[in-house]
Amino acid sequence: MKKKGITILSTLLLVCSLLCGCADKSSVQENGIKEETPATESFVDTEEEETSAQSEIVVEEEKVAIPDGTYTADFDTDSSMFHVSEACNGKGILTVENGEMTIHISLMSKKIINLYPGLAEDAEKDGAELLMPKEDTVTYSDGLTEEVYGFDVPVPVLEEEFDLALVGTKGTWYDHKVKVSNPEPLEGETQTENIFQMEDGTYTIDLAFEGGSGKAKVLSPATVTVSGENVTATIQWSSPNYDYMIVDGKKYLPINTEGDSVFEIPVLFFDKPMDVIGDTVAMSTPHEIEYTLTFYSDTMKPAE
């Protein structure tokens, strides 16, 4: 009996020892976890941060970026009372220059008198830079024309909504969301003809002139004649010393013999610089000088 009691006692002591050992080990592990957990959690957080950063990079890479140039693009709004003219088929002319994007839209009428790239509450603050209207002439499918207001709207991003506030003739500002999407390159006179639905006739158009020494320039506005798919511009220099011009590889002679030089040249496209060459005899020997002309389609008006 005494031996059996010793055995039982030994067994109990062994069990207690094991239990204490487990408890100590558990305590050590627990302490270890407390010490190591932050490192583990830090690793997980870092991994999540890296994943998040990678996601942000992917999102950034997925943002639409297009080269400098001129495009047609869809212009969508959140209101049936605020949209482009039906004559424009829901589209505007998107210009990209040095990465900055602007879309010209022709609206339904002249009832919207200002736009603001942001919220209405900011538009009403002193010093707010409002977008001013331009007079556009739109042509409907039945041939009728109408004068409406058009605006040049800065585009911060493509394919995503952004804020654009408006004010009408009643003087109340309203918030709206708009989106510019599906840009397509605008190339050639035929495509421009289809977009603006220009009927045959004579128009005036504003143009920008660059190049040369600055002593001579082309006057603006110019006269544009539309006949079928042919669009030509009659331009006048501020000098009588130009004896020919070259456009798209073809030479054009003046159409006048007295006064400042006047030429009739083709308009290859609108809303982006068009390369031309003017030969001047103002110097001791004739010189061909490179220039650019930009014809702004949103300024076209029927000639009086």
Image (cartoon, rainbow, N blue to C red):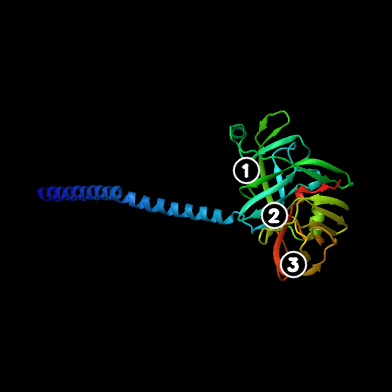
Q: How many marks?
A: 3
Which residue: 75% across, 36% down? Answer: 81
From where the camera sits, is residue 199 visible? no
Q: Is residue 36 left or right of residue 286?
A: left
Kind of element beneath mark 1? strand
> Would residue 136 be seen by someone viewing this image from the given angle?
yes
Q: Residue at x 67, y 45 (%)?
A: 153
* In the rendered image, the vertical position of residue 285 relative to residue 262, given as above or below: below
Give coordinates of residue 286: x percent, y percent.
Answer: 73, 70
- Which residue is under mark 1? 162
Q: Amino acid at mark 3?
A: Val
| Residue 130 lies in quadrant | top right
Q: Amino acid at mark 2?
A: Pro
Say few, some or many: other residues with alpha carbon within 10 Å of mark 1 (under 14 / 14 to 19 / 20 or more): some
Residue 40 place in picture, x, y as percent: 35, 52
Residue at left offset 51%, top offset 52%: 56
The residue beneath circle 2 is: 183
Q: Nearer the viewer, mark 2 or mark 3?
A: 3
Foreground residue among 58 and 220: 220
Q: Residue furthest front?
A: 284
Instruction: Kindly check if marks 1 and 3 are in contact, taking CB atoms under 8 A apart as contact.
Output: no
Mark 3, residues whose alpha carbon is within 10 Å: few (<14), some, or many (≥20)?
some
C-alpha distance separating marks 2 and 1: 17 Å
Cα–Cα gap, marks 2 and 3:
43 Å
Which one is in front, 237 or 106? Answer: 237
